[in-house]
Image (spheres, rainbow, N blue to C red):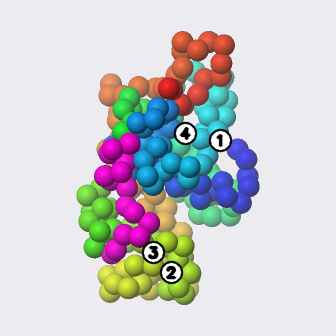
């Protein structure tokens, strides 16, 4: 895995944008102009696809047809965080990959960068998440990157969450890990649902997670 300074936030965002639309099924990786990656909040902004494909190729060489792209995407988000000195968390496995990737569903489900607190709370609630599952650093200092992040310090419930994490020793790492595990369980496909994605027909090319 490339260990540049931007890889962790890129893979975390890729994982989040996958799970928030149709669940954690790696459908954000699927190619096609009507897919998730071409939604307004994703087009020309999501990164890390080549990293996931590289991991998938190496995994397939060792144990073909066993590890899903969805599990790889989830593990990559955790491992990239560790590489930059971030927190660790246990990743439950067994996800399977989805067949459908919808630009319309992504447009409808992904919170906008300028969403207000009520909209964000409703979006997270609809996925079984809460305000406390969205811990962010530097928000109280006014250093939030997006308007949607800054909304946390402009609402009493958001301020309460931030203050609870602003302690010494800080419970942030534990809370962040718990939130990531919770998000990684959104509408997962298991058992006979979904697939273990493999480009079996393209025998002259590396196996990857992106099928056109």
Q: In this view, does 80 lie above or below 196?
A: below
> Where residue 110 sits: x, y (%)?
37, 55
Q: Residue visible at 30% across and 55% down?
A: 127
Considering only order in the chain, which callout, 1 or 3, is on the residue closer to the N terminus? 1
Quick one: label 3, few (<14), some, or many (20+) residues within 10 Å? some
Classed neighbour count for the residue bearing mark 1: other residues with Cα under 10 Å, few (<14), some (14–19), many (≥20): some
What distance separates the C-alpha of mark 3 from that of mark 4?
A: 31 Å
First-in-chain label (3 vs 4):
4
Q: What element carries label 2?
A: loop
Q: Earlier in the sequence, mark 1 or mark 2?
A: 1
| Image-based side of 200 in relation to 180, left or right | right
Name the residue carrying label 1: 51
Position in image of residue 83 (x %, y %): 69, 56
- The mark lying in front, picked from 4 and 1, is 1
Q: Is mark 1 on a helix, strand or loop?
A: helix
Magenta region, residue range: 103-117
Category of crowding for the residue at label 2, using alpha-carbon neighbours closer than 10 angstroms: few (below 14), some (14–19), many (at least 20): some
- Where does residue 192 sit, x and y in percent of width and height? 33, 25
Q: Name the residue under label 3.
A: 147
Label 3 secondary element: helix
> Mark 2 or 4 closer to N-term?
4
| Residue position marked by numbered label 2 in the rendering | 139
- Image quarter of residue 170: bottom right
Label 4: which residue? 72
Real-space Cα distance between discs 3 and 2? 10 Å
The answer to whether residue 78 shows anywhere in this view is no
């Amino acid at each position: 895995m490339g260990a540049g300074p931007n890889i962790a936030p890129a893979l975390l965002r890729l994982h989040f944008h996958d799970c928030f639309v149709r669940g954690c099924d790696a459908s954000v990786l699927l190619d096609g102009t009507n897919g998730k990656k071409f939604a307004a909040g994703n087009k020309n902004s999501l990164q890390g696809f080549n990293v996931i494909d590289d991991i998938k190729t190496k995994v397939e060489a060792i144990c073909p047809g066993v590890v899903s792209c969805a599990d790889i995407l989830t593990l990559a988000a955790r491992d990239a965080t560790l590489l930059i000195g971030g927190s660790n968390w246990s990743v439950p496995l067994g996800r399977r990959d989805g067949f459908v990737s919808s630009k319309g569903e992504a447009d409808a489900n992904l919170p906008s960068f300028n969403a207000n607190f009520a909209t964000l709370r409703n979006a997270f609630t609809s996925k079984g998440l809460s305000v406390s599952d969205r811990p962010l650093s530097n928000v109280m200092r006014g250093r939030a990157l997006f308007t949607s992040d800054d909304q946390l310090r402009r609402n009493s419930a958001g301020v309460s969450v931030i203050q609870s994490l602003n302690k010494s020793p800080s419970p942030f790492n534990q809370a962040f890990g718990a939130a990531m595990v919770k998000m990684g369980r959104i509408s997962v496909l298991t058992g006979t649902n979904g697939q273990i994605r493999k480009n079996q027909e393209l025998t002259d090319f590396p196996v990857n997670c992106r099928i056109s």
